[in-house]
Amino acid sequence: MNKTISTYISSQAIDCMFVGIFTMIGYFIIGEPYALLFGLIAGVTNIIPYLGPFIGAAPAVIVALFDSPLQAVLVIVVVTIVQQIDSNLLSPYIMGKSLAIHPLTIIIILIVAGNLAGILGMILGVPTYALAKTLIVNLVRLIKLRREGIEAENSEKPVV
């Protein structure tokens, strides 16, 4: 269980790092001032589902508005592209590889958990599934070991 939780947390950290780097690169390409700082903010706030990308983009958009409205639009385009790549490709792939869950399963979990419990469901859906999967796999192993142990005990008794 501890391994599953720590793997989930490290996967989230890796995902946030990629979002921060890709956002920073996008900001450099469009000439956004303080690209490194705004990329870092985008990466850190990416951990918050739904609201994180908006919170992370707000400072960059505000600074870009002082430059020109076109620059602000370019910042929004960069954030949108990075978030689409992250949400649809990167995050399911990273979570799937590290937690041994198929990326499509992760997307389905997020959709179902989001519909059932809203934002809280989306935050807790994947780790809950990963913990449940770990628990079930370990219980199945325990049952198999006990059956093998009982069969071994029965086969060792002498036949009279």
Image (cartoon, rainbow, N blue to C red):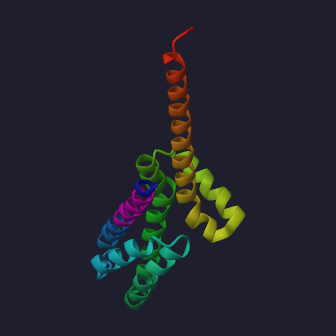
Name the residue: 50% across, 73% down: 48
The C terminus, quarter of image: top right
Vertical comparison of 149 with 73: above or below:
above
Q: Is residue 15 magenta?
A: yes
Vertical comparison of 57 with 2: above or below:
below
- Left or right of 11: which side holds 114? right
- Left or right of 81: which side holds 30? left
Which residue is most to the right?
116
Q: How many marks?
A: 0
Name the residue: 70% across, 62% down: 115
- From the top left corner, tell me how far across and down residue 35 is, in percent: 30, 77
Secondary structure mainly formed by the magenta segment? helix
Asked whether 43 or 32 is in front, the reply is: 43
Q: Which stretch appears magenta?
A: 5-18
Name the residue: 57% across, 58% down: 128
Which residue is most to the top?
160
Q: Quadrant of residue 119?
A: bottom right
- Left or right of 2: which side holds 108? right
Q: Is residue 138 magenta?
A: no
